[in-house]
Amino acid sequence: MRTIEPSETTVDYEHVAEIFKALGHATRLGILAKAVSGEFCVTDLQEHLDRSQANISQHLAVLRERGLAIPERRGNRVCYRLADERLAQIVKLAVDVTNSVSRGGLSDEGGPQQR
């Protein structure tokens, strides 16, 4: 198994955990997955996630507070975009890992186990 080497600076695992907590809800992951394709507004998410505007706004507040989504006013609408494009990679990787685990787990090298 590979170990994770700390970078030259000290890693703040508490902060990393806070980011993962923000990612740890299906609605927020759905919001970020939608954001991968570009900027979006709350009304876009209502249709995509089948959630109320109030519910989506609550989840967007968590993403904003953690610095994961950036709001931009467009007339009377507020649209959002990913704060960092690497979030798209995190969401994709999480989906890939979940799919691999569902099919029988991961090997020590990080890919699906060979049987």
Image (cartoon, rainbow, N blue to C red):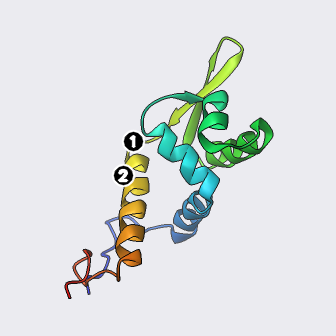
- The residue labelled by disc 1 is 85
Q: Position of residue 63 (x, y in %)?
A: 62, 47
- How crowded pointer 1 is (Cα within 10 Å; few <14, some 14-19, many 20+) is rated as few
The amino acid marked with disc number 2 is Gln
Q: Kindly identify the residue that appears in the image at 71 percent across and 42 percent down.
A: 56
Count how many numbered circles sit on residues in the image: 2
Q: Position of residue 64 (x, y in %)?
A: 63, 42
Q: Is residue 21 above or below residue 58?
A: below
Residue furthest toward the right?
54
Q: Is residue 87 above or below residue 6?
A: above
Please state if 9 lies on the left or on the right of 40 as rendered: left
Q: Quadrant of residue 48?
A: top right
Q: Position of residue 115 (x, y in %)?
A: 20, 88
In this orientation, does residue 7 appear? yes
Do the CB atoms of the residues marked 1 and 2 lie less than 8 Å apart?
Answer: yes
Q: Kindly identify the residue that appears in the image at 38 percent across and 64 percent down.
A: 9
In this orientation, does residue 68 appear? no
Distance of label 1 from label 2 (alpha carbons): 7 Å
Label 1 SS? loop
- How crowded pointer 2 is (Cα within 10 Å; few <14, some 14-19, many 20+) is rated as few
Q: Is residue 50 above or below residue 39?
A: below
Q: Kindly identify the residue that appears in the image at 60 percent across and 26 percent down.
A: 79
- The residue labelled by disc 2 is 89
Q: Position of residue 17 (x, y in %)?
A: 56, 67
The amino acid marked with disc number 1 is Glu
Q: Quadrant of the N terminus?
A: bottom left
Q: Quadrant of residue 101?
A: bottom left
Q: Kindly identify the residue that appears in the image at 36 percent across and 60 percent down.
A: 93
